[in-house]
Image (tube, rainbow, N blue to C red):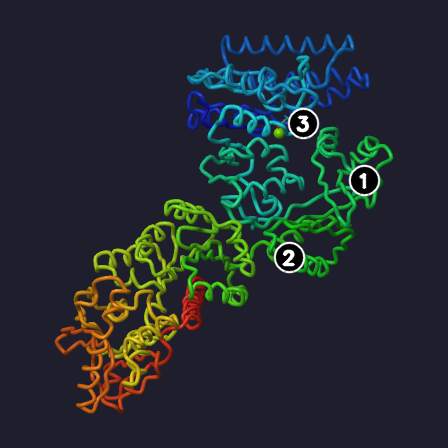
């Protein structure tokens, strides 16, 4: 079975040394059963075109000169690469063919495509011989036996069959690019530069895994690297952008190349045969890479308005002039951009249906993510103004904007445009998991916040994840319409798929923001880290996981230079984490943290005055969305125990949950059973609470649920969460229902502690706290 189709273009075969280099690549990269597709060596096709022209013009002298030129080129290649009977064999075949050409020309029966086909026939044969000579048995194959067209349409079924029959496994086939045959067995070509298309077609027919296009550039660049030194080589470009670039005449990939890959999983790589070590550009399926920015230039074009274009007519016209033609519709009118040298031919073909709007145009197109095009148009217009470049025609579409100018865009201007429009700031991809109360608000706040961060950082929300479904868009999800997109496009996913998609994101930085309350989701953190994601958690599970796992996670983060923020897992948006970090970084030593770290328990204890049963308050709190779905999560004290553990770890202690004593705010036996059963026994809870309340009162104190952590002089740690009776005039006693309070003692804040107080729950403040983490992260990444 063919795994990979390797295609080598003319420039890769431009000399004997290049043939040797290609042979080495094939030896190193190919297995028997792979296929190689070749173009004509160097500029051979151009020379053959000239030969045809001199024949048509009855220029006998010219004809024999050009033929001699071809003969010399081929025989020099053969002489440089072969000895013995390989050499004589190849020279004899060449001689035979050249004689036939001469004969046919003499009798006036030369056929254009058959003549042009020689370029590919020669290069396939020479390469196959060379590989065989180097010990890798290879067969050259004439693609006219594989690809048949009828009325210009490829006969896919028949071709597939032919490919499968003729290219049986266990040999290496070197197939001619560019050429095919019609049903009458006449040679036809697939258009200039058609060999890439031959390669992708062959891959399709053979169900190959991948196509490698070996060329003279290292891949797909943001702009022409020969003109702009800072051009960026992109590791990944998605198919639609590659196709658009081809339609705009960018030479790296040709318009038809991608079509056989549609609806297949065949991978496509563009890589350099001159620098095998250089990493390639991969052309990936839609959505598997973010949209990139490109500037592609034009020279000497005419803008032609056409009455109407038939389907396929642009393809026919570009076949006619052997050059790509860009077409677009603007204000309901159909336009084509034609190389000025071919305008006459095109106008003739369109006989009266077209007229020239502007001639001798230069210019460029900026290709970008749809969300960026409008802004880039404004910027480019301004830059052109500053450079005194006059725009004669402007057209913008979803994915690009086209500037047609008087002046050629020289390297200097191109470099400025590139610098300002393409080399944008750093990028951060954001994956948001959990779209509950807080998650929804967080996403809503993103709209403003992302715009704010944009001044320094290009932040894109690329994925939304919620209970087994995800919405993924590598180029970014439009935040204002995410709900609609979620409805239409969210899909079920398995964890492995989520990880894979995240792994494929080609952003400089990525962050997973976990706003779920799911322990299972926190178990994925190590895998996110492997994909080089920073982490932001509102979720408390990872921060309170067992110490070995937790320390391991920290080590992995450090190893990869990644950050983990979890500001909101304690005290919602309150900056407790900043306070603790600051004290420690400035040389203080924290000796004690006391307080109320649960908004729910704060509300319950502060609201209770004996007039309403405690269980009634619990039910009210639940209805207001203050509690966990099962309020016993709060009443058990577990939630506060987790928060105290996070604080403890933040000040450098290696505790586990069990090291924090826990006294629930309910009778212990009520932890069992369902919530409804719990409610049938609510008097038991009320009695429990009332008794504690009275006891506190008898001591002239008030009942609160608090956490406490202290480190004595010997470094011994004691930590607990539970019911506490506190003095009526203490800060804890005066807490506004729902607020959290942190009372921090340290060497500097010994007798008069540092107190931090405020809302410790609520979707707005929590979501804002997560934004604080995101902002912090972007500041660190700069
Ligand atoms: N040799 C042909 C040409 O020059 C086909 C190709 O290079 O892809 O157009
Ligand atoms: Mg070529």
As displayed, is residue 204 above or below residue 613? Answer: above
Disc 1 to disc 3, C-alpha distance: 23 Å
Q: Closest to the observer: 578 or 437?
A: 437
As displayed, is residue 137 above or below residue 346? Answer: above
Quadrant position of ligand 2: top right
Label 3 lies in ligand 1 vicinity (Cβ under 8 Å): yes
**Residue 328 in view (yes/no):** yes
Where, by quadrant of the figure, is residue 217 drawn?
top right
User: Is 242 placed left or right of 761 in the picture?
Assistant: right
Please tell me whether mark 1 or mark 2 is closer to you in this view: 1
Q: Helix or strand or loop: what does disc 2 sit on?
A: helix
In the rendering, at what x and y percent does residue 251 appear? 63, 37
Q: Of label 1 and label 3, which has the lower sequence position?
A: 3
Q: Helix or strand or loop: what does disc 1 sit on?
A: strand
Quarter of the C terminus within the rendering: bottom left
User: Is 606 placed left or right of 160 in the picture?
Assistant: left
Circles 1 and 3, Cβ within 8 Å, touching? The answer is no
Quarter of the N terminus within the rendering: top left
**Residue 649 in view (yes/no):** no
Q: Closest to the observer: 572 or 288?
A: 572
Report which residue position mark 2 lands on: 376
Q: Closest to the observer: 641 or 742?
A: 641
Q: Of label 2 and label 3, which has the lower sequence position?
A: 3
Disc 1 to disc 2, C-alpha distance: 28 Å
Report which residue position mark 3 lands on: 191
Which residue appears farthest toward the right when viewing the image?
Answer: 352
Which residue appears farthest toward the left when viewing the image?
Answer: 714
In the rendering, at what x and y percent does residue 474 appear? 50, 50
User: Dot 2, crowdedness within 10 Å: few (<14), some or many (≥20)?
Assistant: some
């Amino acid at each position: 079975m063919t795994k990979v189709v390797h295609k080598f273009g003319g420039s890769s075969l431009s000399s004997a040394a290049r043939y040797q280099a290609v042979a080495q690549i094939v030896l190193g990269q190919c297995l028997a059963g792979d296929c190689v597709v070749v173009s004509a060596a160097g500029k051979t096709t151009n020379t053959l075109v000239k030969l045809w022209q001199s024949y048509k013009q009855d220029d006998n002298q010219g004809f024999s000169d050009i033929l001699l030129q071809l003969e010399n080129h081929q025989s020099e290649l053969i002489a440089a690469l072969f000895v013995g009977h390989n050499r004589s064999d190849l020279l004899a075949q060449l001689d035979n063919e050249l004689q036939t050409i001469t004969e046919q020309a003499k009798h006036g029966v030369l056929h254009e495509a058959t003549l042009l086909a020689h370029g590919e026939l020669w290069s396939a044969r020479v390469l196959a011989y060379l590989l065989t000579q180097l010990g890798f048995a290879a067969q050259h194959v004439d693609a006219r036996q594989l690809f048949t067209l009828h009325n210009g349409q490829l006969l896919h079924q028949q071709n597939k069959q032919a490919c499968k029959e003729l290219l049986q496994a266990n040999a290496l086939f070197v197939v001619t690019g560019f050429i095919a045959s019609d049903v009458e067995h006449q040679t036809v070509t697939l258009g200039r530069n058609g060999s890439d298309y031959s390669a992708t077609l062959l891959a399709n027919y053979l169900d190959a895994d991948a196509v490698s296009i070996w060329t003279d550039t290292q891949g797909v660049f943001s702009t022409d690297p020969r003109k702009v030194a800072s051009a960026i080589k992109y590791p990944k470009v998605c198919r639609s952008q590659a196709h658009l670039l081809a339609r705009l005449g960018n030479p790296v990939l040709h318009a038809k190349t991608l079509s056989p890959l549609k609806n297949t999983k065949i991978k496509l790589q563009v890589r350099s045969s001159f620098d095998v070590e250089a990493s390639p550009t991969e052309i990936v399926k839609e959505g598997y890479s973010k949209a990139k920015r490109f500037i592609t230039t034009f020279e000497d074009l005419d803008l032609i308005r056409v009455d109407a274009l038939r389907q396929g007519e642009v393809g026919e016209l570009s076949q006619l002039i052997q050059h790509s033609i860009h077409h677009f519709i603007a204000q309901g009118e159909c336009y084509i951009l034609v190389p000025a040298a071919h305008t006459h031919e095109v106008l003739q073909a369109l006989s009266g249906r077209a007229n020239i709007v502007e001639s001798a145009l230069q210019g460029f197109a900026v290709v970008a993510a749809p969300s960026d095009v409008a802004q880039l148009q404004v910027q480019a217009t301004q830059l052109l103004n500053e450079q005194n470049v006059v725009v004669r025609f402007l057209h913008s579409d979803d994915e690009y904007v086209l500037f047609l100018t008087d002046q050629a865009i020289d390297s200097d201007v191109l470099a400025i445009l590139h610098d300002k429009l393409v080399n944008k700031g750093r990028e951060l991809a954001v994956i948001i998991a959990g779209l509950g109360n807080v998650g929804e608000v967080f996403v809503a706040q993103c709209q403003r916040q992302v715009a704010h961060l944009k001044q320094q950082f290009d932040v894109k929300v690329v994925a939304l994840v919620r209970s087994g479904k995800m919405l993924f868009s590598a180029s970014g999800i439009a935040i204002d319409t995410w709900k609609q997109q979620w409805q239409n496009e969210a899909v079920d996913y398995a964890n492995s798929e989520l990880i894979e998609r995240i792994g494929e994101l080609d952003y400089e930085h990525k962050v997973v923001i976990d706003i779920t309350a799911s322990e299972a989701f926190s178990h994925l953190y190590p895998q996110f880290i492997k994909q080089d994601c920073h982490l932001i958690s509102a979720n408390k599970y990872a921060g309170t996981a067992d110490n070995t796992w937790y320390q391991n996670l920290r080590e992995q983060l450090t190893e990869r230079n990644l950050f983990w923020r979890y500001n909101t897992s304690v005290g919602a948006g309150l900056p407790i984490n900043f306070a603790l970090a600051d004290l420690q970084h400035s040389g203080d030593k924290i000796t004690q943290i006391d307080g109320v770290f649960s908004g729910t328990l704060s509300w319950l204890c502060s609201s209770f005055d004996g007039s309403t049963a405690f269980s009634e308050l619990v039910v009210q709190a639940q209805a207001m969305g203050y509690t966990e779905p099962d309020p016993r999560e709060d009443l058990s004290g577990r939630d506060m125990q987790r928060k105290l553990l996070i604080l403890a770890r933040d000040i450098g202690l290696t505790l586990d949950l069990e090291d924090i004593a826990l006294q629930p705010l309910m009778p212990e036996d009520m932890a069992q059973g369902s919530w409804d059963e719990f409610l049938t026994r609510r008097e038991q809870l009320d009695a429990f609470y009332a008794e504690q309340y009275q006891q506190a009162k008898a001591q002239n104190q008030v009942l609160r649920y608090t956490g406490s952590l202290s480190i004595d002089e010997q470094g011994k740690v004691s930590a607990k969460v539970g019911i506490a009776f506190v003095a009526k005039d203490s800060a804890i006693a005066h807490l506004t229902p729902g607020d959290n309070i942190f009372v921090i003692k340290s060497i500097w804040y010994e007798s008069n502690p540092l107190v931090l107080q405020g809302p410790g729950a609520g979707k707005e403040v929590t979501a804002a706290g997560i934004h604080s983490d995101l902002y912090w992260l972007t500041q660190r990444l700069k």
